[in-house]
Image: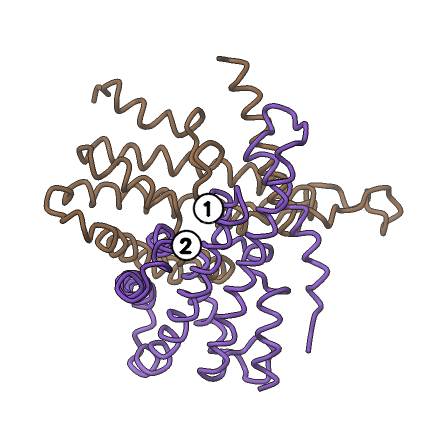
Chain colours: A brown, B purple
Amino acid sequence: MALSKKTKEAFLGPLNANNPVLVQILGICSALAVTVQLKPAIVMGLSVTIIVALSNLVVSLIRKSIPTRIRIIIQLVVVAALVTIVSEVLKAFAYDLAMQLSVYLGLIITNCILMGRLEAYAMTNDPWDSLVDGLGNGFGYAWILVVVAFVRELFGSGKLFGLQIIPESWYVANGGFYENCGMMLMPAMALILVGCIIWFHRSINDEKK
Amino acid sequence: MEHALSLFVRSIFADNMIFAFFLGMCSYLAVSKDVKTSLGLGVAVVFVETITLPVNYLLQVYVLEPLNLGYLSFILFIAVIAAIVQLVEMVVEKFSPSLYNSLGIFLPLIAVNCAIMGASLFMQQRVQLDPENVKAIANIGDAFAYAIGSGLGWLLAIVALAGIREKMEYNDVPKPLQGIGITFITVGLMALAFMCFSGLNI
């Protein structure tokens, strides 16, 4: 299927130049809280991608029959229904992960990316573009989560996906020289890491201009 | 009574919505440019939190649990929050136009503030805890204490950040880091400072 320029832009824009986390500063809450390890971060990223894409699609399909005064409530109900489905699926097939994500799974409902995209894009564009825009924004959000989680898990506990990466013999306890950076596991470091990613992102993008 | 007091103090400092759970970050970062506006938003959050959380508590204990409808909680909670925000907006507009003028623009924002929804979801988890646990919410009084505490914690965090950002206007920050970048790092450092409360117990 040939993609029009607009559709391409809807997908590629949010990945870099118009990234929801780095540029629009949306959806920070969950981006920070679930990134201690890679696995929950990836699951969270995927869940958000699915929910943004589908809710964009649904709202775009019914956009002409939504009365503007109560649109927020309608959007919230669509999103809440999708989140409930995703969370029930996760509870059925990956119970431990669902418990690890705890309230943050439910908080996808109030994730600003969703409301932002629904208001700004799905309400005025046709379903196919909205679906692609949702996917683009979801992946734009997911890659930030993965980068932050990668750094935090690698330096915080010396592991990736729960597997030991840094050799055991390097640790001080085994006569080596290495110690895990406990700071990385704390909430505060997630904020500082995202701050640094924004710094890199802006300095690279400004140079291009 | 003691338990409610402990819950109240812990939810302001140790379990601070912003610094421990990152809830309500979006409006926290967007609106904290000056102290006055952030105070307005903070007060609105405390207000809405204090009303919605006990309502959701009653729903959870008397409707969802006995009927085994736990999976409906997301939809129900968000509907309650959206409806109450709308209701509060109308009531305030009718009875206190001056309060409406100062709070008005923030109220619609609050329906999608994660701090409100997050507090309700934490309440849902805490209801199931053993009543002896310091985090347990065992009755409606505890629910009120937790609601006011977490709202005030959020208020404290946003006013503090706004104060720092007002001062930071005059600092020489590297260009790509200006604005949102340095704000993130500031919040990170504030979160570090707040970690000293984490052992707090009454």
Say whether marks 2 and 1 touch (CB < 8 Å). Answer: yes
Instruction: Specify few, some or many for label 1: CA neighbours under 10 Å numbering under 14, 14-19, or 20 or more.
Output: many
Q: Residue at x 37, y 25 (%)?
A: A12
Residue farthest to the bottom, as pictured:
B1
Mark 2 or 1, nearer chain start:
1
Chain to which the residue tagged by mark 2 belongs:
B
Q: Residue at x 69, y 42 (%)?
A: A155
Instruction: Specify few, some or many for label 2: CA neighbours under 10 Å numbering under 14, 14-19, or 20 or more.
Output: many
Q: Which mark is residue B113?
A: 2
Question: Is the residue at mark 2 from the same chain as the one at mark 1?
Answer: yes
Nearer to me, A162 or A188: A188
Left or right: residue A199 versus residue A83 is right
Residue farthest to the front, as pictured:
B98
Alpha carbon separation for disc pair 2 and 1: 8 Å
Q: Residue at x 46, y 56 (%)?
A: A104
What is the three-letter code of the residue carrying label 1? Cys
Q: Residue at x 51, y 19 (%)?
A: A205
- Residue B58, x across and y down, in percent: 36, 79
Nearer to me, B98 or A194: B98
Residue farthest to the right, as pictured:
A175
Identify the secondary structure beneath mark 1: helix
Q: Quadrant of the N terminus of chain A?
A: top left
Identify the secondary structure beneath mark 2: loop
Residue farthest to the left, as pictured:
A65
- Residue topped by disc 1: B26
- Residue A48, x across and y down, in percent: 38, 46
- Residue A201, x across and y down, in percent: 54, 26
- Residue A49, x across and y down, in percent: 36, 42
Nearer to me, B92 or B47: B92
Left or right: residue B21 versus residue B63 is right
Nearer to me, A130 or A171: A130
